[in-house]
Image (cartoon, helix red, strand yellow):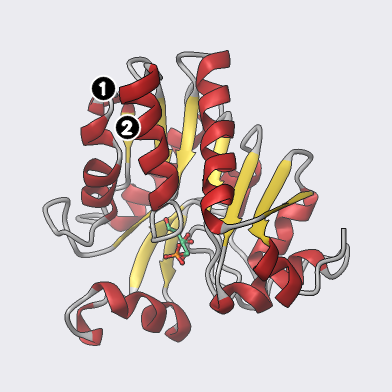
Amino acid sequence: MNVVVTKSYEASCKAAADMIAKAIQANPAAKLGLATGSTPLPIYKELIRMHTQEGLDFSQVRTVNLDEYCGIDASHPQSYRYFMNENLFNHVNIDKKNTYVPSGMGNLEQNAAELEAKVFEGGTPAVQLLGIGSNGHVGFNEAGSRLTAQSHVEPLVETTINDNARFFEKREDVPTQAVSMGMKGILAAQSIVLVATGASKVEAIRGLVQDDCVYPQNPATFLKLHPNATIIIDEELAKQAGYKA
Ligand code: F6R
């Protein structure tokens, strides 16, 4: 696992966007594994800028998203399909037919099986972009005594529901389940880039940088098993998490 420390969150996002752009330049039909949440927003803004100002071409790019809430459909502003359309897909020349976000509606077991197939179809992502939950979750693989390998329906834990309540009108509106890529699909990506910033991520990042161990209580620590995973953090977070290069 490679840890990159930048001057600022903005610089972290620029570095992550550069890695994604490089993958597209190396293979115009690259497959990208994408994340939602607040962390990647500046990354997507930068990719849109690269598209409009520098001609970064998404016409053949394929994408698969990590997860989707259960029980809210694509027209719901907090659904991850809506998020991806609003924050990236509508602003670049990607063919939406080449983008996949699980639906989170209908038969959820079928959703999970479809997501699992999409992760591996035509080869695994060249780059998997990740954020990290305050409890160390990646995708919606929640912290606990065990992790699930394949894509599955995951009950969201209290901390995650609380963390995500900021996006909804009322806490009761936050979905309590998500369809998520499992640890196997995440770790199958050819490269992984995780970006984190802010005080709420200190403990999760400490688990990543403090030793060479993996803990199901901090799912992100499994990235230590990946041959090509990069963690990008700003110097403030690095300092608070006790990271020493
Ligand atoms: C989102 C996802 C989640 C988020 C995590 C951090 O697709 O899979 O693991 O990356 O909850 O969210 P933010 O970036 O909002 O702090």
Question: Do we see residue 128 in this rendering?
Answer: yes
Name the residue: 21% across, 50% down. 82
Mark 2 touching mark 1, by CB under 8 A?
yes
Tell me if mark 1 has few (under 14), some (14-19) or many (20+) residues whose alpha carbon lies within 10 angstroms of its own: some
- Nearer to me, 117 or 189: 189
User: Tag 1's secondary structure?
Assistant: loop
Q: Position of residue 35 (x, y in %)?
A: 44, 50
User: Tag 2's secondary structure?
Assistant: strand
Name the residue: 36% across, 42% down. 45
What is the three-letter code of the residue carrying label 1?
A: Asp
Mark linked to residue 99:
2
- Nearer to me, 137 or 242: 242
Q: Is mark 1 within 8 Å of ligand 1?
A: no
Q: Position of residue 241 (x, y in %)?
A: 74, 74
Tell me if mark 2 has few (under 14), some (14-19) or many (20+) residues whose alpha carbon lies within 10 angstroms of its own: many
Q: Position of residue 239 (x, y in %)?
A: 75, 72
What is the three-letter code of the residue carrying label 2?
A: Thr
Question: Do we see residue 145 in this rendering?
Answer: no
